[in-house]
């Protein structure tokens, strides 16, 4: 994972993570959602608090969304992309974290 971040003296911080481009020739199905796992995220340093985690997936395919599992102070367990059909999809996963570093 590639990370950039900003830390403030107040203890607040922002982190932006980006993974290498991924592609999936087919997606798994759960009910009406087709999904694929994009992997876990390990923060570049431990946080004392995670306030928000916002996911993105830059893709040439339409109607693709991304979500993650529960965040801890050291990272996010897993992240996924989903869509309404099983067509192949490729893109670049990213995450924006706000929290506290001290």
Image (spheres, rainbow, N blue to C red):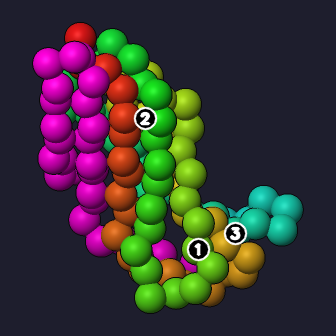
Q: Is residue 88 left or right of residue 1?
A: right
CA–CA distance in space, label 2 to label 1? 20 Å
Identify which residue is drawn at 44% across, 68% down: 57
Q: Residue at x 15, y 47 (%)?
A: 4
Q: Are marks 1 and 3 in contact (CB under 8 Å)?
A: no
Q: CA distance from mark 2 to mark 3?
A: 21 Å
Is residue 74 highlighted in magenta?
Answer: no
Q: Is residue 78 above or below residue 94?
A: above
Classify the position of the C terminus by image quarter: top left
Left or right for 20, reference 76: left
Q: Relative to 30, say whether 44 is above or below.
A: above
The residue closer to the viewer here, 94 or 6, is 6
Instruction: Report x, y in % for residue 65.
Output: 59, 66
Q: Which residues are magenta?
A: 1-26
- Which residue is at the far right? 31
Residue at 58 percent of width and 74 percent of height = 64
What number is the disc on residue 76? 2
Tell me if I can see residue 27 in this picture: no
Q: Which residue is mark 3?
A: 34
Q: Position of residue 30 (x, y in %)?
A: 78, 59
Mark 1 lies on a secondary structure that is: loop
Q: Residue 18: percent from the left, percent from the top?
A: 27, 57
Q: Residues within 10 Å of mark 1 (few under 14, many from 20)?
A: many
- On screen, residue 47 above or below 89: above
Task: Bin the neighbour count of mark 2 within 10 Å (Cα to Cα): few under 14, some 14-19, many 20 and up.
Answer: some
Q: Nearer the viewer, mark 1 or mark 3?
A: 1
Q: Position of residue 96 (x, y in %)?
A: 36, 47
Q: Which residue is mark 1?
A: 64
| Mark toward the start of the polypeptide (1 vs 3) | 3
* SS category of the residue bearing label 3: strand
Q: Specify few, some or many for label 3: CA neighbours under 10 Å numbering under 14, 14-19, or 20 or more.
A: some
Q: Magenta part mainly helix, strand or loop?
A: strand
């Amino acid at each position: 994972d590639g990370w950039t971040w900003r830390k403030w003296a107040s203890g607040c911080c922002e982190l932006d993570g980006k993974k290498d481009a991924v592609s999936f020739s087919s997606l798994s199905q759960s009910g009406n959602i087709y999904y694929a796992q994009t992997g876990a995220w390990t923060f570049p340093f431990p946080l004392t608090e995670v306030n928000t985690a916002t996911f993105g997936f830059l893709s040439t395919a339409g109607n693709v969304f991304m979500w993650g599992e529960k965040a801890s102070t050291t990272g996010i367990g897993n992240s996924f992309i989903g869509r309404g059909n099983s067509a192949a999809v490729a893109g670049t996963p990213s995450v924006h974290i706000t929290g506290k570093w001290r």
